[in-house]
């Protein structure tokens, strides 16, 4: 099936020629990483401090970056997990900077290990270790341990959804929110939107290749819910959630259905759907009207979840 590009938000379509859909597999992943790394990063739009830390990971040192707009005490904190299909990206993340600047909170961005060199559960365990570090060192970091959230975009949203389940089943660190920005949560794509083959930026064939690399094979329905959250049969007991997605995203139906399932399981979940938005377009064109609406939406949800610090 072919997606009708006339459905795309016209303000976003100029980027399609400059950024054709990614075509990634095991044979070219290293070359694509090198190509992306060779492109100079544009200067950040946000005035935040960046502190790089090395913490103890499950299998050795693990790098995190702390983004802050101020040094006010007892800040709310977000553990941020970058996107990139589980195979690309780094903790050096502009959306993490934006959240820190807009909400004056601490954002701890995790440089988790990537597939295919490090398939699941490596990345998930890295994220869990970083969450425990953030909670256990909250006082020293100037963070309010009662106001911690987790979140990410795309594969980062998928890792955050899996982390919410993993955390529930282990230490159950109290969390105010799981912030899931068009999360990559379904290894099967067995939905209506998952049948289109020509989605912009992140297309069906590339997504299946990324899942194969991340899961080190094709386990189908047997995939761990910590890797592909839609495989979970029990969603009770996880933190409140915010889910957003565009109507022209490969993940549209799976994300909407996951939000519905969370609410049916008694987990308060806000769902925001943006007409005409395709995967990642807001990150490439942040000034577009739909991109601005998306940012305001998730920032409001995260800010509301943080509330105010408890009085001593």
Image: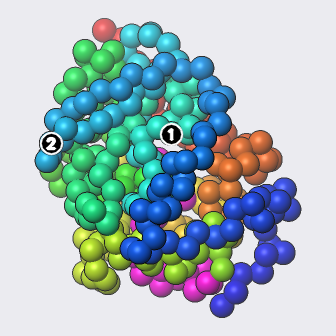
Q: Nearer the viewer, residue 199 or 225?
A: 199
Q: Would residue 156 appear left or right of 145 to someone viewing this image?
A: right
Picture quadrant of residue 150: top left
Which percent across, then down, holds residue 204? Answer: 54, 79
* SS majority, magenta: loop
The residue indicated by pointer 1 is 93
Find the magenta span and give its range.
Answer: 177-197
The residue indicated by pointer 2 is 60
Which percent across, then down, holds residue 193? Answer: 60, 79
Q: Residues within 10 Å of mark 1 (few under 14, many from 20)?
A: some
Which percent across, then down, holds residue 97? Answer: 54, 31
**Tag 2's secondary structure?**
strand
Q: Earlier in the sequence, mark 2 or mark 1?
A: 2
Magenta-drawn stretch contains 196: yes
Q: Would residue 287 appear left or right of 267 to someone viewing this image?
A: right
Q: Nearer the viewer, residue 190 or 113?
A: 113
Report the disc number at residue 262: none
Q: Nearer the viewer, residue 59 or 191?
A: 59
The residue lying at 35 percent from left, 43 percent from top is 111
The correct choice, above or below, for 106 with respect to 251 in the image is above
Magenta-drawn stretch contains 93: no
The residue lying at 30 percent from left, 18 percent from top is 141
Quadrant of the frame with the N terminus: bottom right
**Tag 1's secondary structure?**
loop
Which percent across, then down, holds residue 269? Answer: 48, 54
Q: Nearer the viewer, residue 223 or 203?
A: 203
């Amino acid at each position: 099936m072919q997606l009708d590009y006339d459905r795309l938000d016209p303000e976003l379509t100029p980027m399609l020629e400059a950024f054709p859909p990614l075509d990634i597999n095991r044979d070219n992943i290293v070359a694509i990483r090198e190509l992306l790394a060779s492109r100079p990063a544009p200067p950040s739009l946000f005035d935040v401090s960046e502190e790089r830390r090395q913490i103890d990971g499950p299998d050795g040192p693990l790098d995190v970056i702390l983004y802050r707009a101020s040094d006010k005490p007892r800040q709310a904190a977000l553990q941020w997990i970058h996107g990139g299909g589980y195979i690309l990206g780094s903790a050096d993340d502009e959306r993490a900077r934006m959240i820190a600047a807009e909400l004056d909170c601490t954002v701890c961005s995790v440089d988790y290990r990537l597939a295919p060199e490090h398939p699941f559960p490596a990345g998930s365990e890295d994220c869990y270790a970083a969450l425990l570090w953030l909670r256990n060192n909250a006082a020293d970091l100037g963070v309010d341990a009662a106001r911690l959230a987790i979140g990410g975009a795309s594969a980062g949203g998928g890792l955050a959804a899996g982390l919410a389940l993993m955390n529930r089943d282990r230490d159950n660190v109290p969390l105010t929110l799981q912030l899931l920005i068009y999360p990559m949560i379904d290894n099967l794509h067995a939905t209506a939107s998952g049948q289109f083959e020509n989605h912009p930026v992140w297309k069906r064939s590339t997504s299946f290749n990324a899942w194969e690399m991340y899961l080190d094979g094709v386990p189908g329905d047997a995939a761990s819910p910590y890797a592909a959250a839609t495989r979970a049969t029990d969603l009770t007991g996880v933190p409140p959630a915010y889910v957003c997605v565009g109507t022209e995203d490969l993940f549209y139906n799976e994300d909407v259905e996951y939000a519905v399932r969370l609410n049916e399981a008694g987990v308060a979940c806000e769902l925001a759907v943006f007409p005409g938005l395709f995967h990642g377009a807001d990150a490439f064109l942040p000034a577009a009207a739909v991109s601005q609406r998306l940012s305001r939406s998730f920032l409001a949800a995260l800010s509301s979840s943080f509330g105010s610090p408890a009085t001593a």
